[in-house]
Amino acid sequence: MRVILLKDIRGIGRHNDVKEVADGYARNFLIAKGLASPVTPKAIAEKAAAGRHESAVMQRLTDAAEALGKETLKFALRGDAKGTLFGAVSGEQVEAALRAKGYADAKVTLERPLKHAGEQKVEVHFPRGVKGTVRVVVEAMAK
């Protein structure tokens, strides 16, 4: 029996794959547990629509990651003349600045807060494994 997988199944295939499996396995396990559905013209049309939607989402995320490479985020913190800061820029502050620029689904994970003045590259994660980088400039301003 030909089925469309609704979830990733180890040893069989990934989500939206069309696979040929034994009739009993399909009826008694895959379809009964909601892991697959039988191949019908309607199911094929839904699979094609889901594929188009997924490719459009991936294109949007990839475009956002590329545009992010051209962005610069600036933060000004109190510091001394040597460039030592009296504070730090956290990942949450970088995410908030990205949301203000229109990158709502961007996530930033810093190993440690940015505590030094200057320019740094920060890795930004988008859904579905898309990654980008943004320049972050931290400036020390006098008291």
Image: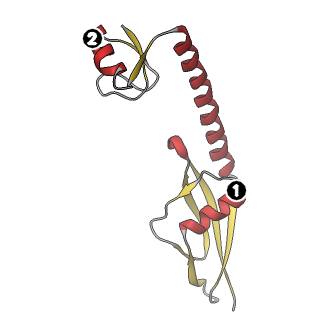
Residue 44 position within the rendered picture, expressed as x and y whole percent measured from the top left: 53, 13
Q: Position of residue 133 (x, y in %)?
A: 59, 53
- Residue flagged by tag 1: what amino acid is it? Glu
Q: Residue at x 30, y 8 (%)?
A: 23
Which x, y percent locates residue 116?
56, 77
Q: What separation in Å lies between label 2 and label 1 (alpha carbons)?
A: 55 Å
Up-down relation of residue 24 to residue 110 (above or below): above
Which is nearer the eye, 7 or 73? 7
Crowding at mark 2 (Cα within 10 Å: few <14, some 14-19, many 20+): few
Q: Nearer the viewer, mark 2 or mark 1?
A: 2
Q: Where is residue 38, by image quadrant?
A: top left
Q: Which residue is mark 2?
A: 24
The correct choice, above or below, for 10 with respect to 26 in the image is below
Label located before the other in sequence (2 or 1): 2
How many numbered marks are there? 2
The quadrant of the rendering that contains the C terminus is bottom right
Q: Is residue 122 left or right of residue 76?
A: left
Q: What is the image's colouring?
A: secondary structure
